[in-house]
Image (tube, grey):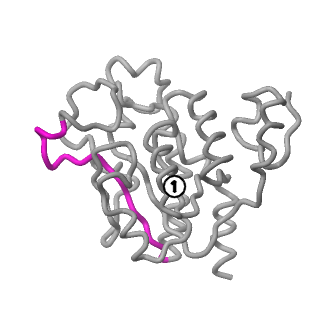
Amino acid sequence: MAEHHDFENHCWQDLYPQEIYDLYAPYRRQKGIKGRCGLLLVDLYNLCYEGGERPVSELYRDYPSSCGEFAWRALGPTRQILHEMRLQGLPVLFSTKDLRNADHQRKASATFRRSGQASENAYDIHPELTPENGELVIAKERASCFYGTPLATYLQRLRIETLIMVGESTSGCVRATATDSFSYGFHTVLVEEAVFDRNPISHQASLFDLHHKYADVMALDDVLNQLRDKTR
């Protein structure tokens, strides 16, 4: 087992040999929420929960877009951070697939993954996370929530300094959005227990990369405590 600095006390802590963690020592820094924050829930629509809380290996043939047990495991932590943001009156935003032009959608997608026929409400936000009045839902065609959307403009208008992110998938749309968030100048926080992927190794490796280069990966309790401290 590798010896770790607190900065590496996350789900990837045993993924690499010690020499890799030593190489990334210059990235260590103080983590946390800076200034006014908002929450972005990335692609938490019905499609990724299809088939229920079962291993992805049992679901992919019938539900190729499902994240199975990983999606359902993250639902509780996601509800907690969503509740706290709403309680404090802080901005909450969602993303989902843009379905406004069906013909164009055949030429534009977030990934190359083949999927079956989606149900009528496949891209509706999961009912346990339903947006409330006034909460913006971003419709997107590509992986990043920023690409071809007005998200950056909305965040600037809301005076957001830190963008807290939850959702799926860690190696796909979450990663692309977090990288763009950094590029647009927003401090970015990923809630570790509330982001997920169908591939656990991709999940760990992607969080490792993002944590060291573009975002602060933080435990749910740490995020909640920092949010509450700001109101005391």
Residue 170 percent location from the top left of the image: 51, 40
Give the residue type that dot 1 points to.
Met
75, 191: nearer the viewer: 191
Please tell me which residue is depicted at 57% across the width and 58% down the height of the picture.
188
58, 108: nearer the viewer: 108
Residue 14 percent location from the top left of the image: 76, 30
Name the residue beneath numbered marker 1. Answer: 165
Please tell me which residue is depicted at 50% across the width and 34% down the height of the picture.
197
Is residue 221 left or right of 203 when viewed as pictured? Answer: right
Magenta segment boundaries in residue numbering? 89-105
Is residue 120 left or right of 144 when viewed as pictured? Answer: left
If the image is split into quadrants, where does the N terminus sit? top right
**Crowd rating for badge 1 (residues with CA inside 10 Å; few <14, some 14–19, many 20+):** many
Residue 90 colored magenta?
yes
Question: Which picture quadrant has residue 202?
Answer: top right
Please tell me which residue is depicted at 65% across the width and 61% down the height of the picture.
223
In the rendered view, tell whether residue 39 sits above or below residue 177: below
Element marked by disc 1? strand
If the image is split into quadrants, where does the C terminus sit? bottom right
